[in-house]
Amino acid sequence: MRLGIVLCFVITLFSKCLGKNPIISTMTEPDYQVAVYPNERDKIVTGQLLQLGAYDGRKILYTKGLFDKISEPFHGLVVDVGAHIGTFALYAAACGANVVAIEPIPESVKILKHGIEANGFGDQVVVFETALTDPMQAKAKEICMKSAPDDAQHSFFDGVDPNFEDEECKTVKLSTLRDVMQKYYENHPREDIYILKIDVEGVEQRVLQGGMEIFKSAPPCYLLIEFNPAVFLAAGTNPTQFLTWIHDELEYDFYLEQDDKSPFQRPVFPQLVEEITKLGSVEVVFKHKKLDQCVRRVASKNKPQKKEKLIVAVEESSESEDLPTPPKKKNSREQKNSFSLRHGGLQGSIPETIDDLDEFVEANKKGAAKKETKKQPQQQQ
């Protein structure tokens, strides 16, 4: 861990000398790279990445579990509203998902695109530079948004952060979730949304209201939301009514991220909000009430149509005779990511940890080689 921190510090200094945003390699599984703000400006996100090798690690671990629920190969869609510099969007891409990343702040968008390029995720992550809101407010087309000095928070409302009052606002584009997704589908396959993550400092309900057509036709299976009652109130949203609205109107059950086995029922929402207010903020999960049906729909509809899209295949395998020849060479990073969610055409049980990966691959290579050896005498005869 100390070595990682030292390396990250050296990389930060080197990048600063070159006039570029630093690039940090995470310690997640799968790992990926994040371009960041200079550490002296953003001590929250960049600080955690430097010290812990990940930002919002609990959400990362939880999301990995959601991807594991769908049988490989997974080509689902993740929508990240309030993507910032891409700590969540890039992780979803590293896990194999296609991602729509929505972020209104131009400098954060620039850093996010730098991270996409560093990881080679240009075909997976599409960025929209806009803020989202409800259809009525979106008619204005743009809005003035304030940023905290550390660049970690942005909002339409002064009360969300005391530091906002002294900051000048920046004019950003304004749109709705529906309009952004329509633009995305004009140039990309119409995949259903598996995970919708929203972190927009109290404007979450307005974002959801701007995508009601999506919830009526093909609702996301999971909503991941940072729930801060004080911030919701500062933004003009009653937190208890927000939970009730999602429960009744959008038909999602409400869980805390650290305990997603038993949903909270409506009668306890007011008391729960009081307890969360004392804590500050928590990560919450909303699961669609028809979750199993939703997951099956996403898994079946989002499967690639062409077999050549599978990442890994073993020649002459009895289960994958018509699959394409695997690439001649893979680096260790590509190999890890391939096995996370896309291990097609291989023999034996899939390894549960990366520690078992090399042994697993070698066993399959030997199996394929034996089959090839048996064929050669027959061909000579």
Image (spheres, helix red, strand yellow):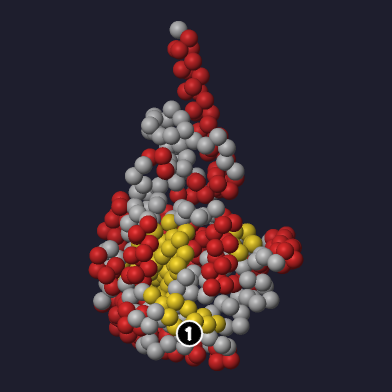
Q: So how many labels did they put on this image? A: 1
Q: Say which of 120 and 6 sits in front.
A: 120
How many residues crowd mark 1 within 10 Å: few (<14), some (14–19), many (20+)? some
Asked where in the image residue 335 lies, by quadrant, the reply is: top right
Q: Is residue 26 above or below residue 202?
A: above
User: Where does residue 81 sit, x and y in percent of width and height?
Assistant: 44, 71
Q: Quadrant of the C terminus?
A: top left
Q: Residue at x 36, y 80 (%)?
A: 138
Determine whether the residue tagged by mark 1 lies in a helix, strand or loop: strand
Q: Amino acid at mark 1?
A: Cys
User: Where does residue 179 sit, x and y in percent of width and height?
Assistant: 34, 70
Is there any visible trace of residue 256 in the rendered image?
no
User: Where does residue 210 sit, x and y in percent of width and height?
Assistant: 33, 75
Q: Residue at x 75, y 66 (%)?
A: 17
Q: Is residue 199 above or below residue 93?
A: below
Q: Residue at x 44, y 77 (%)?
A: 173
Relative placement, left or right, of 335 versus 316 is right
Q: Which residue is mark 1?
A: 144
Q: Is residue 340 above or below residue 52?
A: above
Q: Residue at x 44, y 83 (%)?
A: 143
Q: Is residue 102 above or below residue 170?
A: above
Q: Say which of 333 and 134 sits in front.
A: 134
Asked where in the image residue 178 lies, by quadrant, the reply is: bottom left
User: Where does residue 108 sit, x and y in percent of width and height?
Assistant: 55, 71
Q: Quadrant of the N terminus?
A: bottom right
Relative placement, left or right, of 160 versus 66 is right
Asked where in the image residue 202 lies, by quadrant, the reply is: bottom left
Q: Say which of 271 and 238 sits in front.
A: 238
Is there any visible trace of residue 207 in the rendered image?
yes
Relative placement, left or right, of 358 versus 258 is right
